[in-house]
Image: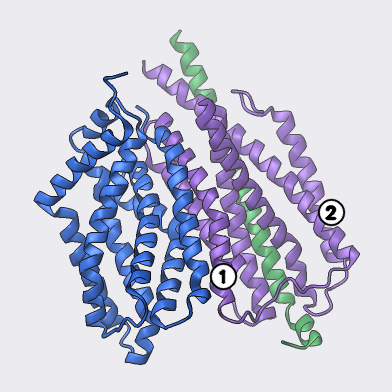
Amino acid sequence: MTEPGFVSSSTLQFLFAGYAVIWAALFGYIWFLARRQRRLEAELKRLERAVSEER
Amino acid sequence: MTLKPSFSRAVWAMLVKDLRLEFHTKEMFSALLIFALLVAVAFSFAFDVAPEGLREVFPGMIWVAFFFAGMLALNRSFASEKQNGCLQALMLGPFDRSAIYFAKVIGNLLVMLASEVVLTPLFFIFFDMRLDGSIWLLAAIWLLATFGFIAVGTLLSALAAQARASEILLPIIVFPVITPVVMAAVKSTAGLLLGARLVDYAIWLKLLVAYDLIFLAVPFILFEYLLEV
Amino acid sequence: MPEAKGPARDMTQTLGLLAAVAVFVALGLVFLWVPAERVMGDVQRIFYFHVASAWNAFLAFLVVFVASIAFLRSGSHRWDTLAYCSAEIGVVFTTITLITGPIWARPIWNTWWSWDPRLTTTLILWFIYLAYLVIRSSAEGSQQQSRLAAVFGIIGFVDVPIVFMSTRWWRSIHPTLIQTDKMNMEPSMVFTMVFSFVSFTILYAFLLSYRVRLETLAERAAALKRDLRR
């Protein structure tokens, strides 16, 4: 195994990469959901208008 | 009540129907045989290993060939019933739906075991393997592993048959679920061929038995839901 | 339980706020408060969120399993929606676990990937639930599709412990070089770990309620479309 000192000095980039991945995945997913929500709400509004016009 | 055939009679009738068809066409059997041999040939080119190293890779090779070929049989198993609405007709039959599952499991198992009986000696000859251990132990491993594969595979093949693009779907859903069988089959075969003591790899045989029992019981409960109209 | 209308907007928003606060506090604990692990150094800080993601993945798949059984028994549509949404979130967290694992492993074990039981099981888990999502997208007719997916959701979960046992025995034949259990956790580390678990569980609850809400919106849109065509 590697020496403790060696590990902590050169591994910060891995720590950074790890959390970057976590944030990218989480925010990416939430962004994807939010975009879908916006589209769905717009579509729902359009559809509801179309339904009420038909009646 | 007298109109309803017993569970075993229903299984038997469907099994005879499937086997008679298979006996005439030899569709699954020949496809299994040819494909498994082709995989073996591909392996021999891909891994040009020395005879000493071959003993190590041979168990993995033989099982990957069997399972890949078995996939072909599974794909046919329910797809053939779908073509002319036969599956609908079977589902309307006056018996438990799990009878369909059991008939298919036994049928697929027999076809796959029959092709393994032909293939195993051929594999041993091609790769110049000698069996030092007990042939009964080998038979037990072959039976347990093939059964585990077929028990899960048949259920999932019924599942895939009702979805779109079932031929593509089936391998994707079967392989992750059977990874324990692949590991146990390869490890126990390696133990047998490398002349290890039985106690050293008995744990894999136990795993196979446990897997077989679990995936015989689970489909028994779930199959009813799979084939609802 | 969400009714046919889906979780209320207020509930989702409250959960979202709570999750954001909890995750940021956890982040603060991980980076500012907890001391670096003695052997592995700073990179060990990945561990807290990595394990919390793994926990969330497991929790999500447990929910898929329970909801699948409940759906098959009751035939109620909302269980089916719950199972589907939970599976999708589970796959997201499994992906996070699978990527952060190697990033952590590289400086510690000097290799990106090792076929260690936990990693292998997680990888197979990922494949199983990807297959679940493929089934979801490949069956026509919602009722049938739901039943197929529910059956697979049960089989997949039953398979997971067997996969774990087999990967463990598979490895134990070779000498294990790596022992992740031998980490000496100080009380502050245990606290940070537990806090990360809790904050991620809240995050899971938020994502699930948000996802279920979206699904019910999509269903309403589909129903309206059907009405219009008539």
Residue B144, percent from left and from top? 39, 60
Residue B11, percent from left and from top? 28, 38
Q: Residues within 10 Å of mark 2 (few under 14, many from 20)?
A: some
Q: What shade does chain C have?
A: purple
Q: Are marks 2 and 1 in contact (CB under 8 Å)?
A: no
Let me know if residue A18 appears in the view.
yes
Q: What shade does chain B have?
A: blue
- Quadrant holding the N terminus of chain B: top left
Label 2 or label 1, whichever lies nearer to me, is: 1
The disc placed on residue B125 is none
Please state which amino acid type lies under the numbered disc 1: Trp
**Mark before the other along the chain sequence, 2 or 1:** 2
Position of C174 relative to B162 (above/below): below
Q: Between residues B140 and B69, which one lies in front from this camera angle?
A: B140
Residue C190, percent from left and from top? 85, 61
Please state which amino acid type lies under the numbered disc 2: Val
Viewed as shown, does residue A37 lie left or right of B183?
Answer: right
Question: Which chain's residue wears label 1?
Answer: C
Q: Which residue is mark 2?
A: C25
Let me know if residue A40 appears in the view.
no
Position of B32 relative to C129 (above/below): below
Q: Which residue is mark 1?
A: C169
Q: What shade does chain A have?
A: green
Q: Residue at x 18, y 47 (%)?
A: B19
Q: Quadrant of residue A21?
A: bottom right
